[in-house]
Image (cartoon, grey):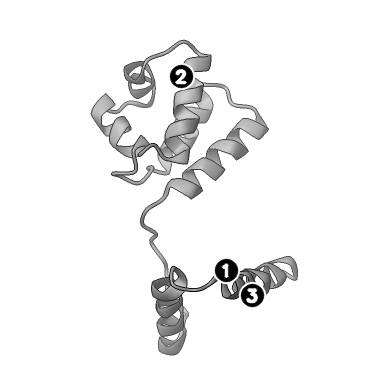
Amino acid sequence: MLTSFGKFCRKLRVDNDELLKDMADKIGVASSYLSAVENGKRNVPQEWIGKIATSYSLSASGLAELNQAVQESQNTLKVDFEGFSGEDKIVFMTMIREFKGLDEKDRAKIKEILLKNEESM
């Protein structure tokens, strides 16, 4: 299934009249690996953002769209827990495990709390 990143890359290739192999060559990877990332079988390597932005001379809005597509396409997330208490780690991991099972009302409450805290920073 094509991810947001895959859709972004496909549009970029169509706009530039390129094949998947052309893009893979530009960012220095095998076309099979690029395809696996576009289809969500692998996470998007962070260094690809700069390579794609440079190779395709993305505007600020294009770069923002690329970053959004990368965020939406990540399957795994590495979290640095340095400085967190054991209890905080447990709460965080529980929230991640249980988030899918929450109804929309509870998800909205969590999002509201987190966004309110982010705005006050």
Using a 10 Å C-alpha cutoff, classify the residue at mark 3 as few (fewer than 14 neighbours), some (14 to 19) or many (20 or more): few
Q: Can residue 70 be seen in this view?
A: yes
**Residue 21 higher or lower than 112, as above or below:** above
Residue 105, image x and y in percent? 61, 73
Check disc 1 and report the residue beneath it: 104
Element class at badge 3: helix
Q: Is residue 90 left or right of residue 114?
A: left
Check the picture and name the quadrant holding the N terminus: top left
Q: Is residue 82 in view?
A: no
Task: Tell me the amino acid under the disc marked 1.
Answer: Glu
- At numbered mark 1, what does the secondary structure look like: helix, strand or loop? helix
Identified at 45% across, 83% down, the residue is: 91
**Res 66 label:** none
The mark nearer the N terminus, 1 or 3, is: 1
Q: Nearer the viewer, residue 54 or 74?
A: 74
- Could you give the CA–CA distance between mark 3 and mark 2, rounded to whole angstroms? 39 Å
Residue 58 coordinates in the image, percent (x, y):
59, 26
Q: Residue at x 53, y 29 (%)?
A: 53
Identify residue for label 3: 109
How many discs appear?
3
Horizontal side of 30 relative to 82 (left or right) equals left
Q: Residues within 10 Å of mark 2 (few under 14, many from 20)?
A: some
Of the image marks 3 and 2, the number of the one nearer the N terminus: 2
Left or right: where does residue 26 sit relative to residue 84? Answer: left
Q: Distance of mark 2 from mark 1, alpha carbons?
A: 36 Å
Q: Which amino acid does label 2 sit on?
A: Arg
Q: Return the residue at label 2.
A: 13
Q: Tell me the SS state at disc 2.
A: helix
At label 3, which amino acid type do we have?
Lys
Quadrant in the picture for the C terminus: bottom right
